[in-house]
Structure formats: structure tokens, C-alpha cells
Amino acid sequence: MFTETYSPHYDGLRYEMSNYEEDVTSSGGYTATFLWTMYHLGNGLDVPDDLGKEQEGNFSLKANAKIGAGGLLDLSTIEILADNRPKGAPNYEVPIEDFLPKN
């Protein structure tokens, strides 16, 4: 989703995932929380000195899904929410699509 949306706008796009934790419930639910970091080369539009320098954006995310047949994730049930709090415990209330540019 990120690559498809951001690759037309940024060069040198790459990602890292860290602080990964997951939980599988007895009722067939799956939750994972993690920090998603997006790196790209600055385009110099907002700050000319940033042209060509690596920039980063961090997203604290929570993925929810159901576990389907064969113990695999049911991809049709995946929901990804972002934390929008600057401090304190995460709230994971914002759908990740709200962070994507509207083309």
C-alpha cells in the first residue's frame, strides 16, 4: 500500500519494521503492533537543503485480522490502524489510509 502510493512521489523509498509484537487469541483473532519507518530521499520542495538527503517518517501501527482456514490470516479481514498521539499510551484510532496522499 505504501509503495504503490508513495513511489510516484519519492525516490529511494524503503521501509523498516521494528518493535514487533503479536498476539493470537483463542477466538481466532490476530493482532500485531509495530513501528513502521519509511525512508525516502528529500525532494527539496519544502527545504531546498534537503534535496537528495534521506528523510524518515515513523508510524506506530496495529494490524488486526481473523485467522481463517488452515491457520492462515484471512487477508480480507485485515485492518491497519495508526496511533496519532504524540505522547502516552497508543490509541490506534486512525485508519492507515488517512495518512496516504489523495491522488
Image: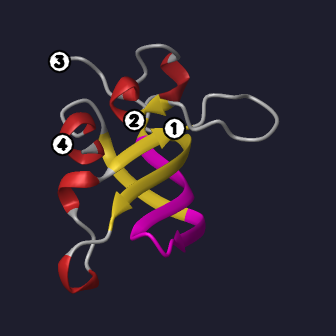
Mark 1–mark 3 distance (CA, rounded to whole Å): 21 Å
Q: Is residue 50 left or right of residue 9?
A: right
Specify the amino acid type for callout 3: Asn
Front-most of 16 and 72? 72
Q: Earlier in the sequence, mark 4 or mark 2?
A: 4
User: Could you say whether the residue bearing mark 2 is in a helix, strand or loop?
Assistant: helix
On residue 96, the disc is 2
Which numbered disc, 4 or 2, marks the residue closer to the eye? 2
Determine crowd level at label 2: few under 14, some 14-19, many 20+ residues with C-alpha closer than 10 A: some
Residue with the mark numbered 4: 4
Front-most of 81 and 36? 81
Q: Residue at x 35, y 58 (%)?
A: 65
Q: Earlier in the sequence, mark 1 or mark 3?
A: 1
**Vertical order, 52 against 12 (above or below):** above
Specify the amino acid type for callout 4: Glu
- Residue stretch in magenta: 18-40
Q: Is residue 44 left or right of residue 21?
A: left
